[in-house]
Amino acid sequence: MAPSDRTFDVVLLGATGFVGRLTAEHMADAAPDGARIAIAGRSTERLEQLRNHLGVAWPTVEVDVTDGGAVRRLAESTAVVATTVGPYLRHGLPVVEACAAAGTSYADLSGESVFVARSIERAHELAQGTGARIVHSCGFDSVPSDLGVGLAHAAAGAVPLVEATVQVRSLRGGISGGTVDSLRQQLAAAQSDPSLRKTMADPFSLTGGPSVRLPRSSRPRGLRQDSSGRWQAPFVMAGYNQQIVQRSSFLTGWSYGQLMRYREVVDTKSGLRGRLQAAGVATASDALVAGLLFPPTRALLDRALPAPGEGPSEKTMNAGRFAIDVDVYPVTGAPVRTRFAAPYDPGYRGTAVMLGQSALSLAFDDLPERAGVLTPMVAMGDALAERLRQHRFTVETSSLGPARA
């Protein structure tokens, strides 16, 4: 069935959750006239309340993701499903498989290596056969990193890269309860199945694996200083975002090069104070993962961390912002930077805009003829970047000067 023959262009699944509601609000403002959008979730009453709040006439669809028949009918009714129903390792695979089987495009907010690896295993070939674009990680994880590297790589001449460095320059916003729960569920699964830890740790776990690997001694790690003297610590989502970027390279014939060194870091300050801050950031990130891995400490952290469905106050979200510089160093020619920034809380309003625009891009844009389990860059690339620019995002590439010796 062609997308134009479906009942809907986009169905937003999980619309009454915290991020789902923000995504619905954005789409109510941003969707083109005539777009056939529906909101879906477990409670018709809550969906109707949301529809009244939005002031739209969108249809509502009551569906429980544990009901295989209902999920299949949902996928068959629409050109695109955008879902905020996580943790995806627990709730996402039936939706992915239904969309792949129906030739329906799909977008989510996953930051879960194990889930995406299982999605590739179960749905990639099926989606290639039906023409479905299955696109994971369409929020702050991992659009800035994935588009940032991809657009800079293109501007650098699309030659292999020696290195890609994602630098978080500023970041203000609340902690996502959904993100914390996704990490919690993934670590719990890894505790019972140690093989899953390898999936989470291997930068190439979402690819077939390169024919060559960087020597361990040359892999970026630990604290570092940038050219201005600021200290930088590893970014907490670096491991997962690298997997998505490497999948983009893999899906395009290892276009970034199989020996590309990749790192993600977050700025602190210069001098001794900055080094101590960077060390503190790194220690806190490691402690969070370690604490969630073991039941006794996980129980303590659960009392302090936000629960699924919880989010920050309006005041916190209104003060949110982020700015990221993505620098790539090609084997020939000058290095290139992508500046990726927005005046939004990254985990909430910023993510809602990225997911909403991803869904609209999949539904309405003239995209490359690719199908399967894709990435934001491979599926949408320039089209998504242009959409984000129209919604107060800065997505700009520029040369960093002479080629590095």
Image (cartoon, helix red, strand yellow):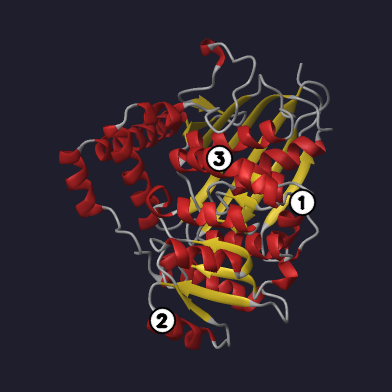
Secondary element under disc 2, as helix, strand or loop, is helix
Residue 120's disc is 3
Side (left or right) of 183 relative to 139: left
User: Picture quarter containing residue 388?
Assistant: bottom right
Instruction: For the residues labelled 2 and 1, say whether their Cβ atoms are less than 8 Å apart.
Output: no
Secondary element under disc 1, as helix, strand or loop, is helix
The amino acid type found where label 3 is placed reads Ile
Side (left or right) of 378 relative to 90: right
Q: Is residue 121 above or below residue 48?
A: above
Q: Is residue 34 above or below residue 363?
A: below
Q: Which residue is mark 2?
A: 44
Residue 382's disc is 1
| Residue 374, horizontal then vertical, whole percent | 64, 44
Q: Is residue 316 above or below residue 337?
A: below
State the residue at coordinates (68%, 32%): 249
Q: Quadrant of the C terminus?
A: top right
| Residue 55, horizontal then vertical, whole percent | 55, 88
The amino acid type found where label 2 is placed reads Thr
